[in-house]
């Protein structure tokens, strides 16, 4: 009799779990169907009421590039004074999934990041070690090393 009661309790628990999983999956499917609401641009009358003028996209792009252009005055003390831990080259995949080959003069290294001057961008950049594809090359010695081993050597 005790075995029968235990079996019934087990069946109830399993049934409750299955119902909970089905409900969660149904909610998840509902989330996938929803569309992201994007606001409509302001009309000419609304811009005029707010005293806004429409600027052409090219002017906005030019202003953004000018504001984000690397400048010698914004360089860090490490770059200005010539701190360096070595020059390395590697293949890197950024957060957007774009792959590029980089040559970097490293200024500081942690177990997660390499920070230094990127020769391609002519600016200071920070690179995550786990986004380095394959091995990196020490440009000064020609060694081909695992990025984590190289970082642990230079910490």
Image (cartoon, grey):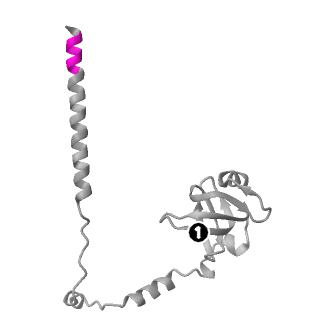
Magenta highlight on residue 4: yes
Compared with 97, 60 (above or below) is below
Q: Quadrant of residue 112?
A: bottom right
Q: Quadrant of residue 88?
A: bottom right
**Circle count:** 1
| Pointer 1 local density, CA inside 10 Å: few below 14, some 14–19, many at least 20 | few
Q: Residue furthest top?
A: 1
Residue located at (65% from left, 71% from top): 117
Q: Which residues are magenta?
A: 3-9
Residue located at (73% from left, 52% from top): 153
Question: On the rendered image, what quadrant is the N terminus found in?
Answer: top left
Question: On the rendered image, what quadrant is the C terminus found in?
Answer: bottom right
Helix, strand or loop for the magenta stretch, by majority = helix
Compared with 5, 65 (above or below) is below
Mark 1 — residue? 100
Magenta highlight on residue 108: no
Q: Quadrant of residue 10?
A: top left
Residue located at (26% from left, 71% from top): 38
Q: Position of residue 114 (x, y in %)?
A: 63, 61
Q: Residue furthest right?
A: 141
Horizontal side of 42 relative to 120 (left or right) equals left
Q: Position of residue 126 (x, y in %)?
A: 59, 65
Residue located at (23% from left, 17% from top): 7
Q: Position of residue 15 (x, y in %)?
A: 21, 29
Compared with 66, 94 (above or below) is above
Label 1 residue SS = strand
Q: Position of residue 30 (x, y in %)?
A: 22, 53
């Amino acid at each position: 009799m005790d075995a029968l009661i235990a079996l019934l309790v087990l069946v109830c628990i399993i049934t409750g779990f299955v119902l909970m999983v089905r409900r969660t999956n149904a909610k998840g499917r509902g989330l996938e169907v929803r569309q992201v609401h994007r606001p409509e641009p302001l009309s000419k009358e609304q811009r005029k009421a707010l005293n806004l003028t429409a600027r052409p996209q090219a002017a906005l792009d030019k202003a953004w590039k000018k504001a984000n252009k690397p400048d010698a005055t914004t360089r860090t003390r490490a770059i200005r004074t010539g701190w360096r831990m070595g020059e390395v080259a590697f293949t890197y995949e950024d957060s957007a999934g774009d792959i590029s080959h980089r040559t970097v003069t490293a200024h500081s290294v942690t177990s997660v990041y390499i920070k230094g001057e990127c020769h391609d961008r002519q600016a200071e950049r920070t690179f995550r070690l786990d986004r380095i594809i394959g091995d990196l090359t020490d440009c000064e010695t020609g060694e081909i090393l695992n990025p984590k081993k190289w970082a642990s050597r230079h910490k």
